Amino acid sequence: MKSLFYLLSFVILLTITHLSAAQTPSAAPAFWPEGKSVALSLSFDDARLSQVDVGTKLFDEYGVKATFFVLTSSVSKRLDAWKQAIANGHEIGNHTEQHPCSGNFPWAKPKALEEYTLDKMKSELIRTNKALEAQLGITPRVFAYPCGQTFVGRGVNTKSYIPLIAELFSVGRGWLDEGPNDPTFCDMAQLTGMEMDGKEFEQILPIIENAKKTGHWVVLAGHEVGESGNQTARVAMLRKLCEYAQNPANGVWIAPIGTVAKYVQEKRK
């Protein structure tokens, strides 16, 4: 009986150990440069004035490069500042000309995605790239979906414009997504973008720490840069985040979306 008891105990112990190992994320294989454990990209939408009045200056203090998805009409309000941002190594992306979203948003009804076609969207994207080339001397290779919405049309005529983004850009970033990107699997035309507006550093840190366990790529997205307010990435949070990411002990590779995307694509090859 004793032998049977010890045998059963051994089997139970092995089962518990196996289940525990299955539930715990395994250490991610080395993927990121210089032995980093996780990639992090900071991105901002709409070319809001606070992004160059406050944001780029803050990032320049820490040597951090960010990605800005801009509207041509907004860029013209701070043209010299945006040119300086590019000179300092920040990345500029296409965010369309009209910022079309679903007409369920009252402000979007005159430019509702439900009234768009793929041809109309393609024309707008190309026109925006040409305008940004004229304004800033660069042709964007990265894109962010306005409102995170990826469709045109309605009902049986609804179409995804993700394939169009894949044709015209190296990256398409979403909005209000729930998790980071697996660099060995993710679709570059629909990268997840996680909100950082209104968040404290203590809310962002667990996202990065969890991504370290799997070697994923965290893409954060915001709008205004300031001390408070609606749709605003807090200055205090960004400072702590930059300090954390720039500390080699934390194993974070922080870089613009296009830079990380290029590395991932080359690594996959």
Image (cartoon, grey):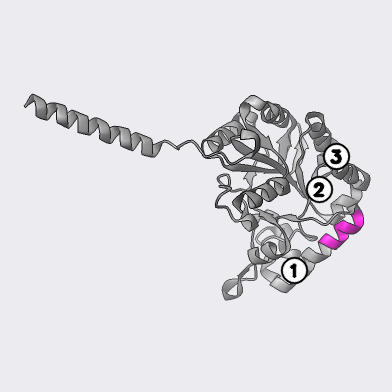
Query: Where is residue 174 drawn, in percent x and y?
Result: 64, 52
Could you tell me which secondary element the residue under label 2 belongs to? loop
Residue assigned mark 2:
47
Q: Is residue 59 visible?
A: yes
Q: What are the residue bounds of the magenta stretch?
A: 129-135
Q: Is residue 230 visible?
A: no
* Above/below status of 227 relative to 146: above
Report if residue 130 lies within the magenta region. yes
Query: Where is residue 241 drawn, in percent x and y?
Result: 68, 30
| In the displayed structure image, the side of residue 94 where residue 87 appears, left or right | right
The amino acid on which the numbered mark 1 sits, given as a three-letter code, is: Lys
Determine the image quadrant of residue 54: top right
Q: Residues within 10 Å of mark 2 (few under 14, many from 20)?
A: many
Residue assigned mark 1:
122
Determine the image quadrant of residue 211: top right
| In the displayed structure image, the side of residue 262 where residue 14 appears, left or right | left
The residue drawn where x is 68% and y is 58% is 105
Report if residue 198 lies within the magenta region. no
Question: How far is mark 3 from mark 1, CA to CA?
Answer: 30 Å
* Above/below status of 253 relative to 249: below
Of discs 1 and 2, which sits in the foreground? 1
The residue drawn where x is 37% and y is 35% is 21
Of discs 2 and 3, which sits in the foreground? 3
